[in-house]
Image: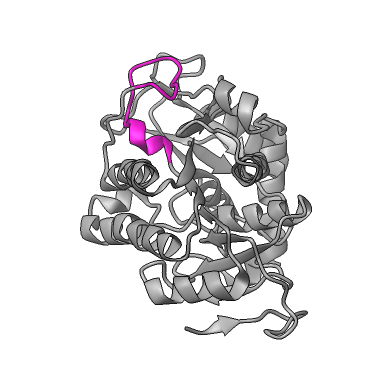
């Protein structure tokens, strides 16, 4: 195992850490790490940098470049940093690509999670917050998705996230693991100028890239039974998401009960057409999107409620759509300047 101490700390003077954040060098994980620090909770990061960035990890936070498939490295990190809980954000997150790479997706998301849980059990670490996904629901035919909506994942990615929840459940029965899973839909925005979404598959980066390159963004379908004919989805700000991860960690630290899973949703959603109009207004790049045919299987609306998370995890939509777009655009430009 190789442990990288960031500038500002050495192996000799680092204080013991409490929360291990797997995938903490990624877009969502890095926001969680910063939220932990702002809440006064210590953290350390494990990330193999397959999609994350070492520069996303604050210089005062210990960082281990390792895969969650490396059980001995995880055990050593738990011992070295006094880890007592894990926020598990690491994983292969590309739902569409997972159809072409099912074995890789299962290895990273199922075997990786099992390896992490085994390392935790080996060292008596008994609490975990799991980054799950709305993909566990597939394409539900309901106006508002709740935690009880039937699970019907439509991709290997969604299947692996549901299996991850089952692993936590079963380890809870077998070994007393205290856990909760946070299911979220489309995560956007930025809470720090140095952090931005670098996914090649997410809507905001794709639209920004098209505009910067002088191309017109494309929308799949404008004949849905929605107010403007485009699909309606749940978009949540990454900083709001991070706050609820910290709230879950605090409650687990305090020995308080949590639901097995929570939706982090807006309850209302916005259309792709609204996003395009907001992007044009924020960027100052006037455009009318090109409209392509619907994609097969795309439902008109997928929106989740967040009532349980609001009750237990300090969940709230603190950012408007304009703030989501503006923060993402500014962070993207700052990072690439």
Q: Which quarter of the rendered picture does the C terminus lie within?
A: bottom right
Q: Which quadrant of the structure image shows residue 117?
A: bottom left
Q: Residue at x 35, y 45 (%)?
A: 161
Q: Is residue 337 above or below residue 203?
A: below
Residue 241 belongs to magenta span: no
Q: Which secondary structure type mostly characterizes the magenta part of the structure?
A: loop
Q: Nearer the viewer, residue 239 or 61?
A: 61
Its colouring scheme is one colour
Q: Position of residue 2 (x, y in %)?
A: 51, 84
Residue 161 visible to the viewer: yes
Is residue 140 inside the magenta stretch?
yes
Can residue 284 be seen at all in this image of the molecule? no
In the rendered image, the vertical position of residue 45 relative to residue 293, given as above or below: below
x 33%, y 29%: residue: 298
- Residue 179: percent from the left, percent from the top? 48, 43
Instruction: Choose between 121 and 298: the one closer to the eye.
Output: 121
Place of residue 273 in the rendered image (x, y in percent of width and height, measured from the top left): 53, 28
Position above or below: 45 against 175? below
Q: Which residues are magenta?
A: 133-149
Of residues 199 and 160, the one nearer the viewer is 160
Count of numbered badges drawn on the protein: 0
User: x, y percentage for residue 91?
Assistant: 41, 57
């Amino acid at each position: 195992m190789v442990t990288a101490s960031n500038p500002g700390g050495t192996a000799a003077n680092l204080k013991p850490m409490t929360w291990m954040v797997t995938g903490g060098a990624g877009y969502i994980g890095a926001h969680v790490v910063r939220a932990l620090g702002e809440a006064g909770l210590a953290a350390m990061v494990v990330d193999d940098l397959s999609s994350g960035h070492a520069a996303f990890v604050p210089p005062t936070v210990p960082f281990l470049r390792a895969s969650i498939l490396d059980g001995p490295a995880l055990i050593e990190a738990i011992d070295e940093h006094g880890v007592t809980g894990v926020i598990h954000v690491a994983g292969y997150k590309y739902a569409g690509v997972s159809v072409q790479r099912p074995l890789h997706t299962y290895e990273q998301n199922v075997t990786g999670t099992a390896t992490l849980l085994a390392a935790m059990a080996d060292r008596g670490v008994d609490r975990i917050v799991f980054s799950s996904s709305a993909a566990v629901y597939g394409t539900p035919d309901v106006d508002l998705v709740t935690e009880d909506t039937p699970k019907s994942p439509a991709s290997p990615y969604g299947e692996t996230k549901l299996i991850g929840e089952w692993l936590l459940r079963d380890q809870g029965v077998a070994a007393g693991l205290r856990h909760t899973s946070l299911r979220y839909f489309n995560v956007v925005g930025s809470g720090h100028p140095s952090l931005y979404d670098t996914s090649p598959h997410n809507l905001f980066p794709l639209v920004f890239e098209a505009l910067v390159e002088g191309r017109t963004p494309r929308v799949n379908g404008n004949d849905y039974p929605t107010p403007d004919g485009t699909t309606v989805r749940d978009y949540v700000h990454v900083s709001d998401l991070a706050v609820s991860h910290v709230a879950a960690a605090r409650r687990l630290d305090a020995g308080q009960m949590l639901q097995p899973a929570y939706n982090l949703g807006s309850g209302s959603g916005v259309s792709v057409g609204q996003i395009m109009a907001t992007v044009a207004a924020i960027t100052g790049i006037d455009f009318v999107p090109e409209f392509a045919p619907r994609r097969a299987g795309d439902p008109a609306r997928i929106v989740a409620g967040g009532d349980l998370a609001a009750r237990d995890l300090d969940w709230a939509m603190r950012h408007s759509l304009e703030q989501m777009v503006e923060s993402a655009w500014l962070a993207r430009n700052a990072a690439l300047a």
